[in-house]
Image (cartoon, rainbow, N blue to C red):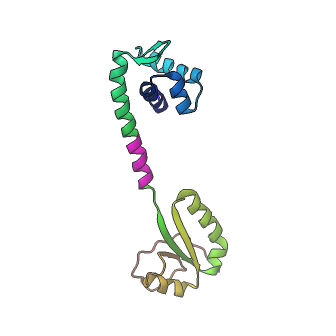
Amino acid sequence: MELRQLRYFVRIIETGSMGSAAQDLDIGVSALSQQMSRLENELAIRLLQRTSRGVTPTNAGLAFYSQAQLALRHADDAILAAREARLSGHVSVGMAPSTASILGIPFIHAMQENYADVRLHVVESLSGNLERMINTRQIDLAVVFQKDKILRWSARRSLKNSFF
């Protein structure tokens, strides 16, 4: 059973007609009828009584209708909760010019792909200035070269490279 079949079924009951429901759902009448036949076959029970004047639910169809409405409300609530849980907002990231020239574009693309609702602002500056900007909360995070002094913010090593 698919959610779209439930949506189709509910719309048919609400309109009382396959034709009206198909028009509302922007699908063909035969495609809608096939989906309802599949649903009825899967449940092994007749849900709809088709007549020349339209469609009416059987007793089983009426019982199914109320539960289908409830299931669709729950599904819509789940979709809404997932959408609202997406990360969003604004993040400012500082990088040294040499780091930005290598990691900047791939980082921006990865952020856009994985966090489409997050607005990203990249700041280029020297590591010492980036540390000051972090401490004064002008930026949210920074990619800096390792320093011997302890920062008052959490730090995580992301890359290790020996140049000499």
Please name the residue shown 54% across and 27% down the image: 22
Is 78 magenta? The answer is yes
- Find residue 117 and report its horizontal and vertical position in percent: 51, 60
Is 37 magenta? The answer is no
* Quarter of image, res 76: top left
Q: Is residue 162 left or right of residue 148?
A: right
Looking at the image, residue 45 lies above or below residue 26: above
* Quarter of image, res 55: top left
Please name the residue shown 58% across and 85% down the image: 126
Q: In this view, does 53 lie to the left or right of 104?
A: left
Magenta residues span 76-84
- Find residue 135 and report its horizontal and vertical position in percent: 43, 84
Please name the residue shown 47% across and 12% down the image: 51
Please name the residue shown 51% across and 76% down the image: 142
Looking at the image, residue 120 lies above or below residue 124: above
- Find residue 74 and report its horizontal and vertical position in percent: 36, 39
Q: Report the predominant secondary structure element of the magenta stretch.
A: helix
Residue 54 is at least partly visible in this image: yes
Quadrant where the image shows the N terminus: top left
Judging depth in this view, the residue of 125 and 90 nearest the camera is 90
Judging depth in this view, the residue of 19 and 28 nearest the camera is 19
Q: In this view, does 134 lie to the left or right of 107?
A: left
